[in-house]
Amino acid sequence: MPRKLVWIQNKNFQGFGCSECNWVFEPVGELGGKSLDEMKQKYEAGRDKEFAAHDCVRHPGAARPKTEWVAAVLRALKIKAANTRDEEWIKTLEDGRRVKFIYQELPEDGAFITAQLAGHEVVYSVVLTRAGNPLSRDDVESHFNGELSKKSKN
Ligand SMILES: [Zn+2]
């Protein structure tokens, strides 16, 4: 099972983590950048590098820590996006599984979209730049065709 960078959200943590172990991205340092775009790029570059470097075997079963920094980034994104569209809906797939989609417009034609299968902790998410807002529900759902077409492991 190849590991993937996934969005994780529960009562103790929200941020990016590994689909196959308990590694989560914990950025070090200040929330920098002159613009939202620059901040996002720095954040994503750091995240992708750390993700590529981590060793799943060394993160089994560890408790997911609270990550204040990640929460701060998300608050910043949320606040800056406060006047834009934010939509949430549930769709039932052909095989009966239910998926919750969230579509959050970001400034500068960005979008933050997520899909979560009912009863699962893992949330798939994508940050789009030049999204072509506003996106339709079909547009958002089509981004997750790959993830959602996989049969569950049970
Ligand atoms: Zn891992």
Image (tube, helix red, strand yellow):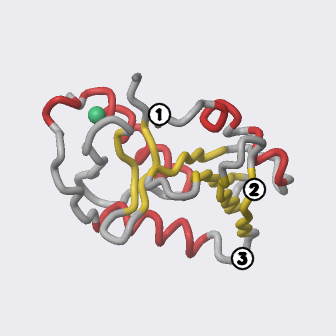
Label tally? 3
- Three-letter code, disc 1: Lys
- Report the amino acid beneath label 2: Lys
State whether label 2 is within 8 Å of ligand 1.
no
Between 150 and 124, the one lying in front of the other is 150
Residue 53: percent from the left, percent from the top? 25, 27
Q: Residues within 10 Å of mark 3 (few under 14, many from 20)?
A: few
Q: Is residue 23 above or below residue 84?
A: above
- Which circle's residue, 1 or 3, is located before the other in the chain? 3
Mark drawn on residue 83: 3
Q: Taking 98 as reference, is 2 left or right?
A: left
Instruction: Please identify the quarter of the rendering in which residue 106 is found.
Output: bottom right
Of residues 19 and 69, which is closer to you in this image?
A: 19
Per the image, the residue denoted by label 1 is: 153
The residue sitting at 38% across, 38% down in the picture is 19
22, above or below 51, in the image: below
Dot 3: element: loop
Kind of residue at disc 3: Asn
Residue denoted by label 2? 91
Image quadrant assignment for residue 33: bottom left
Q: Is mark 3 within 8 Å of ligand 1?
A: no
Instruction: Report the disc number at residue 71.
Output: none
Q: Nearer the viewer, residue 125 or 90?
A: 90
Mark 3 or mark 2, whichever is nearer to me = 2
Residue 70: percent from the left, percent from the top? 36, 61
